[in-house]
Image (cartoon, rainbow, N blue to C red):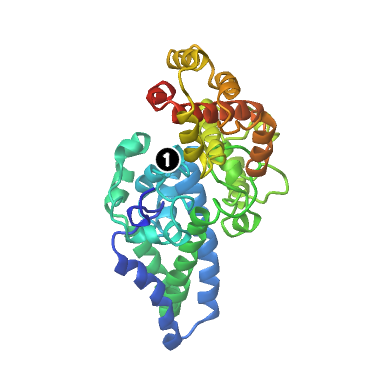
Amino acid sequence: MSSATEYHNDIIYPNTAAFIFVHLAPLAAFWTGVTTTSVILCITLYVVRMFGVTAGYHRFFSHRSFKTSRAGQFFFAFLAMSSTQKSVLWWAALHRHHHRHSDQEDDVHSPVHRSFFYSHVGWIFDKKHNDTRLDEVPDLAKYPELRFLDKHQLIPGILLGILCFAIDGWSGLLIGFFLSTVFLYHGTFFINSLAHVHGKQRYVTGDDSRNNWWLALITLGEGWHNNHHAYQRSTRQGFRWYEVDITYYVLKAMSWVGLVWDLGEPPAEVVRNERRVGTAVLERVSRQLAEHFSTGSLVTQMAAARESLGTHPKVIELRAKLAAKQARAEEAWHELQQYLPHLPHLPSAAEIRARALQIYADSPSTDDIVARTRQMIAERFSSELFPELKPAFA
């Protein structure tokens, strides 16, 4: 595992000073005063721009989970970028990368591989991913107006700040714009730092995404994160009637008047958790589960077993079959235990299932995950016993 200093998150800023300034600016209100108008502006702009982040940056540009007109697309881009979280091209590119590598080593904002602090704000100080990866978003990069906004990322935020000052002077700027921006930053960041740590998992997704009701409330629906990772094409992230998803409600209302259309819906079998996981997720979950059966004494046990290998014909025969992939590792391991009493215990399917259900939600693929995990453990044991056979299990 690499160090946290090599990592970052979904929303990165070109320099640390600007980020710190946004956080410090509201403190000037101690001298300028706070008005009722500025407080109303702060609350309103938090909600409106959070909708821009969730509907624009995330559900439209990152996942294309609904359709809109060219003008509607520009509206969502401008509204999202008024949050000063860089361009829609940059945001969508990194977010798509996140989903391909969710909670793996290459994930750009996983608290599983990095600390909470790093996944929440530490990435801000990492310049590694400053540039927009246009190759990740060819469907978006073809629009010249989006390329223009990518080159001039501060325009929406600056114009909004000027508007806040025009409405309520310094209080409007400091509280209405800057303080709501700070709240918006951290509301968004909590999805990266907390929604993969705190909450419940309804679906097996191969990562640590979780559903969290209070995160859903402060982010207008983004807290139903495990739902989202289970079916990313869905515009609706609160799959059940009681899972409040304000962003979806607004988009649904917009669809009634033709402003957006083709809103993605999760298939019934997904909602009911009846769909089997794909091969990639099956492999990832099984690999993770197999690691839970690693023991510190494994190396010692294998060393003792290797010393007792001898030249028993059956052992030689099984080694040859494993090398030629003519025998399954689990079956061979049981046979080997008859001749090598020092071999570690191969966990039973029941033991693996019990551990799986402690870690993951139950799913139609649980039996497949258990079987694949047992196979991986047996292959790892075999490669430790016969190091020369490791390539056969790669």
Residue count near mark 1 (Cα–Cα under 10 Å), binned few <14, some 14–19, many ≥20 = some
Residue 269 x/y as whole percent? 68, 29
User: In the picture, which quadrant includes the C terminus?
Assistant: top left
In the picture of the structure, the residue carrying the numbered disc 1 is 96
Residue 13 x/y as whole percent? 33, 59
Closer to the camera in the image, 349 or 250: 349
* Helix, strand or loop status at disc 1: helix
Residue drawn at x 44%, y 13% as measured from the top left = 320
Residue drawn at x 36%, y 50% as measured from the top left = 2
Residue 163 x/y as whole percent? 40, 68
Instruction: Determine whether, in the image, residue 376 is placed left or right of residue 370.
Output: left
> From the viewer's perspective, is residue 361 above or below residue 9?
above
Instruction: Determine whether, in the image, residue 83 is placed left or right of residue 213.
Output: left
Looking at numbered disc 1 in the image, what kind of residue is underneath it?
A: Arg
Q: Residue furthest bottom?
A: 31
Closer to the camera in the image, 9 or 379: 379
> From the viewer's perspective, is residue 74 above or below residue 43?
above
Q: Is residue 226 visible?
A: yes
Counting every numbered tag in the picture gives 1
Residue drawn at x 41%, y 22% as measured from the top left = 389
Q: Is residue 68 visible?
A: no
Closer to the camera in the image, 230 or 259: 230
Residue drawn at x 37%, y 42% as measured from the top left = 93
The image quadrant that residue 106 belongs to is: top left
Closer to the camera in the image, 283 or 308: 308
Residue 102 x/y as whole percent? 47, 42
